[in-house]
Image: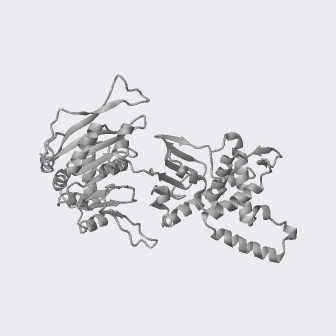
Amino acid sequence: MAYPLKKDVINEIVKIICEKIDAGEYGDNVQSEELLSFEIAKNKSEGIQKIREANDEEYRSYITNLLDSMLNEDGDYVTKNGEAVFISSKEKAQIIEQVFGNYRGFGLIGPLLMDEEVTELMINGPDNLFIEKKGKVIRLDTRFCEDTDCEEEERIKRGEVQLRRIIHRIADRCNREVNEANPIVDARLGKEYNGSRVNIVLKPIAMHGDTVTIRKFSKKPMSIERLIELGSITNEIASKLKMLVAAKYNIFISGGTGSGKTTFLNALSNFIPSDERIITIEDSAELQITAIDNLVSLETKQANSEGKGAITIKDLIKSSLRMRPERIVVGECRGEEALDMLQAMNTGHDGSLSTGHANSAKDMLTRLETMVLQGASGLPLDAVRRQIGSALDIIIHLSRMRDHSRKVVEITEVLGYEGGEIKLNTLYKFEEDKDTTTVEKVSGSLNRTQNPMHNTDKLRLAGIFQDI
């Protein structure tokens, strides 16, 4: 971004270039209005059509030509106040991308989507933009409309129009429809944006203006090695988890919002042997499993404008059972599909993986009970608990710490159903180091408890005789 003193100048240049594009001007070849004949107007109209049909590279060249026509021989731009301001090559590139984004891309948010350090983008109306960078949420000193030639109310309206235009562009790219009749949309962007997850809520459902939340994903799939480097787990824990995955333990990953469940699931999935057939099922395809050749990725589908054609996770789990899966990986269980997932784990699909929202491993069991009952309210609670206790082997709980780091804080064994409740056996628990931890920085380790692991049969059947 430009340094603050040039912010207004760059906004002025961007606005003028956009006005030139809307007027169909060509930079150095602009004709004065007095000399514009019918024939020239006709050729100009044809030229505008060609520009609209131009590929992205040609369109950027067109914008560059317009920008160059506004600068003098020294590379200075003369402002409306008569001040000559030098525009560097970096600032020229910024202006070109910003204008390009207004017409072909995602406008103001385009550069943010390309910034590898930004992990989440939050837009709360046209004047409130926030990003998450290195685990911290930062408010940006920018707005969708920075015009100074109008009243504040008019400026906000212009910003709302620009934001809505970008929202429709995002929805179109994702093959989704968003409007007053369908004001809430979940989608994901294409490969050029690494499949980033998008949530859109329009005004007046979002009371303070259209809201867009984009969870970005890295170009490189998250690996266990990267998690070790970030301090989420240790080499020792990674080797233990690898054994559990190889031995086909059914593993459920729990955690709060933003704790890194999907990221961890993705890393864990890459421990699956490469010769197995895997079916992944997600609301929005986020998993990046690279080591499996025999991989089928399924994604839900929202209903159309008539309320028909929806394909749910529940539907996909049922369908996946007919695809000869050796393991099923469900991105997240949120509702009634939990029953189908548990039944799959109980009917020969050992080694399946999934995630869910919860505040602890024990709380995850309660959440699963609630989810199962959403789809089968007639089932006795006793039967539900038996199903959960039989299906799950291991729960890994993640947490986002006060210093914004994400860590594995608990690894728990599910022992089964006994005495009216599901028995848990905590194997590893995160403990802070009282001598080195501070309010700003959490320091500690995931320590082995004194509790021995009981369900070792799968390890032994897999030829693994080490202790977890």
Q: Can I make out residue 429 in this image?
A: yes
From the viewer's perspective, is 355 left or right of 103?
Answer: left
Expressed as whole percent of the image width and height from the top left, the position of residue 144 reads 63, 52
Q: Is residue 152 left or right of residue 74?
A: left
Residue at the image position 38 percent from the left and 26 percent from the top: 437
Give the residue furthest to the top. 435
For this orientation, the residue located farthest to the right is 34
Q: How is the image coloured?
A: one colour
Which image quarter: residue 105? Answer: bottom right
Nearer the observer, 291 or 51? 291
> Which quadrant is home to the N terminus?
top right
Left or right: 356, with 86 as reference point:
left
Between 275 and 154, the residue placed more toward the observer is 275
Total marks drawn?
0
Picture residue at 39% right of the left edge, 66% below the top:
301
Residue in the foreground of this view, choosing between 395 and 151? 395
Q: Could you say which quadrant of the image residue 101 lies in?
A: bottom right
Up/down of 224 relative to 15, above or below: above
Give x and y (percent) for residue 76: 78, 47
- Residue 29 falls left or right of residue 452: right
Q: Position of residue 238 (x, y in %)?
A: 28, 41
Q: Tell me if I can see residue 374 in this picture.
A: no
In the rendered image, the vertical position of residue 181 relative to residue 78, given as above or below: below
Above-or-below relation of 467 to 66: above
Where the C terminus falls, by quadrant?
A: top left
Question: Residue 212, how many percent across, how many down?
Answer: 51, 54
